[in-house]
Amino acid sequence: GALATQLHDYPRMVPDLKAYVVYVLARAQAAPSDGFSIEAALEDVWSARDQMTASGQAFLLMTLDSKKDGRGDEIARRLIASSQTRGDLSWWTVDTDPLLDDLGDTSVEASALALKALVARDPTNPLLERVARWLVANRTAGAYWVNTKQTALSLEGLLAYMTARGER
């Protein structure tokens, strides 16, 4: 559809945004149209992996895993290695919004996305419990995060973590 065409016609999109668009199209099982190929788009995103934040890498990992593509192992290792840990808390720092090409700390979003992506691979990894704790500790209004985007992504990541671990 239109989104697929925009991705094909706009090659200068930031890598994280491309990773997000390819993730959405893969989830929607977009049919090839007007010369657009999800496989070609995924190759384009893969080639930009070194320029991605943790958010883009998480989207790429979820896409690769949905396609049962073994390259997900490399992205998972990169994500894990790039996390920060202090005490019993772990997170990923992202100081811009890669999807909106805007300034602003999006570490909550990046950490939630990385949690969601990594928990599908190994819910027993001790890093993930530390990430879940960091997300909960970084609420600003008790039960909420800074905005609805952070709240939604945090809840998605935490729900994926709880579900994968059999918690209710």
Image (tube, rainbow, N blue to C red):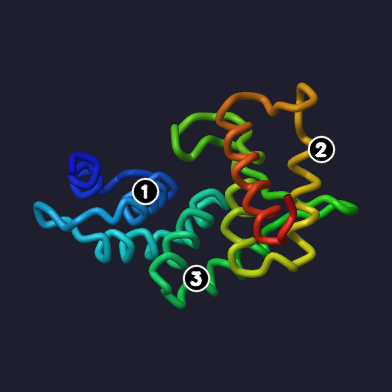
Question: In the image, what residue occupies the spot 80% across and 54% down?
Answer: 130
Image position of 120 with respect to 162: above or below:
below
Residue at label 2? 137
Question: In the image, what residue occupies the spot 42% across and 60% down?
Answer: 63
Q: CA distance from mark 3 to mark 1?
A: 17 Å
Which residue ends up furthest to the right in the rendered image?
87
Image position of 80 with respect to 73: above or below:
above
Which residue ends up furthest to the left in the rendered image?
34
Q: CA distance from mark 2 to mark 1?
A: 29 Å
* Residue 24: numbered disc: 1
Residue 97 visible here = yes
Q: Label 2 sits on what residue type?
A: Ala
* Label 1 Cα crowd, 10 Å radius (few <14 / some 14-19 / many 20+): some
Are the residues at dot 2 and dot 1 in contact (C-beta closer than 8 Å)? no
Question: In the image, what residue occupies the spot 39% across and 64% down?
Answer: 46
Which sits earlier in the primary sequence, circle 2 or circle 1? 1
* Label 3 Cα crowd, 10 Å radius (few <14 / some 14-19 / many 20+): many
How many numbered marks are there?
3
Which corner quadrant holds the N terminus? top left
Residue 111 visible here = no
Q: Label 3 sits on what residue type?
A: Gly
Q: Percent x, y for residue 163?
A: 66, 55
Q: CA distance from mark 3 to mark 2?
A: 29 Å
Question: In the image, what residue occupies the spot 58% across and 34% down?
Answer: 152
